[in-house]
Amino acid sequence: MSAPLLALYLASLVVAPGSSARALLAPHAGAQSAQTVRIGAAAADAARASGAPDVVILRDGKELRGRVVLDLPSKLVLRASGKEREFAPAELAEVRSLERSQRELFEQFGRLARLGARGFATLATFCSDAGLPGEAQVLWLRALIADPEDERAWHELGGVHTPRGWRLVVEGRHATLDELVQRVSTDGGALAVTTTHFVLQGSARTLDDMRENLELALNLERAYLTNMDLLGRALALRVVEQAQRVHVYRVAGTYPAPPVSGDRAWFDREANTVHIDATSAAPGHVAYAQVARLLSYNALGAALGGDAALPAWLERGLAEHLAAAIDVSRGVARFALDAPWAEAFLQQARDSEPVALARLLTAGDATFERGKEASRSLTAAYTLVYFLMHADGGARAERFLAFVGEARQGRGAVSHLEAALGESIEALEARWRAFVAETAAR
């Protein structure tokens, strides 16, 4: 990517694909009035609209452009000009896709981010060259927050040098970083960041809040890739191309009332949006569990089609499994999927009346959301999914993931699980409870 684009992102109008021009300052969800400053939207929308952000070079030297919609060890599917072509690994000389570029970014992130502004600048330049404009702008802003005197960061963000120093251009007006924070700290104000698979909209009371939002924007992409690693190969999941939205509320009084009173985060399926209350604490396990629900819902829906929803225990268990694996240190999320969540196993092992498996497998959404049983049911769903994925050296993992695919097609009943695993529910429950006790005792 050549010229800096943030000045355009902060222009007075944003034109979204398939819509008319609209004012930049738009309401944050749940607020009466608001200012939303957008970063990365124009370039990311343009990249999506082109439909050809990826490059595939064949062994005969032919170069193809399009969108890599499926990338498996056994095959690759490229969509170009509305048609799909499948390639075997032996036909491919080189593949440059958004997701492969993201993996390269995150492989180098820890080493370079320790260098501060200079490291963020290197990563941002890589993203610009790799067709990740949203991630590039996030990183240039990280560089600027790390070193407000970094002239290259100001330049790349479309800043202008005035007699009073460098300024961003916001709504046609010059603004310092602190003044940008002021714009997104008012009732309902937000900074909207568009990356490859997400739109993160977050308010900020301080520069630290804004930095945490930018860290979250990249952690969402890390979570996306991890979820695809977990489910993608077994289920041949295609890339998610619809916008996945996450709204973070840090200003008191702006968090919309959740369906279940007291919830600090919730997933709105109809809006394909997760809402996170961060007014008193940074997003934690509860928030990432809702993000994981968003990820699975989109990945499985996009890949397998149909209107059948996953059984409640399976949806919640998969979400808790991903969320429990997350460790955020110095703003960077890392995932240890095979490490058990000790607290959950201890809680279930000490439960004098643990949730019966037959009851868990037939429970509806309300069981996991309301009443005294919600916490116990969520814990049981997590330990069951962990057991099916990791017990006995992962002996059941392949059959379990095949069941996940069947469940998304409406074949998620107890009998389908028994058939997929080759075990009766009674035998499965005995082995599951023994595993819980053994794991809790470690």
Image (tube, helix red, strand yellow):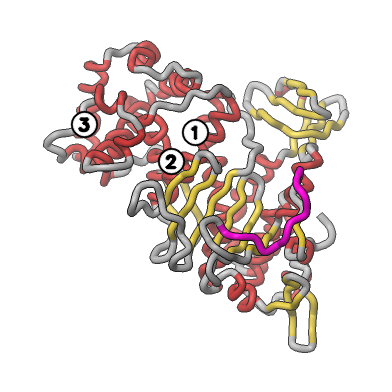
Where is residue 415 drawn, in percent x and y?
A: 34, 13
| Location of residue 211 with respect to 64 vertically, above or below | below
Residue 365 shown left or right of residue 254 in the figure: left
At label 2, counting other C-alpha atoms closer than 10 Å, the crowd grade (few under 14, some 14-19, many 20 or more) is many
Circle 3 SS class: loop
**Amino acid type of disc 1?**
Leu
At label 1, counting other C-alpha atoms closer than 10 Å, the crowd grade (few under 14, some 14-19, many 20 or more) is some
Between the C-alphas of marks 1 and 2, the distance is: 9 Å
Residue at (34% x, 51% y) in the render: 261
Mark number displayed over residue 230: 1
| Location of residue 83 with respect to 418 vertically, above or below | below
**Amino acid type of disc 3?**
Val
Residue at (74% x, 58% y) in the render: 125
**Amino acid type of disc 2?**
Leu
Report if the CB atoms under discs 1 and 2 are less than 8 Å apart.
yes
Mark number displayed over residue 355: 3
Between the C-alphas of marks 1 and 3, the distance is: 26 Å
Indicate the quadrant where residue 115 lies.
bottom right
Where is residue 393 drawn, in percent x and y?
A: 36, 27
Where is residue 133 drawn, in percent x and y?
A: 73, 53
Please provide the residue range marked out in magenta.
17-28
Circle 1 SS class: helix
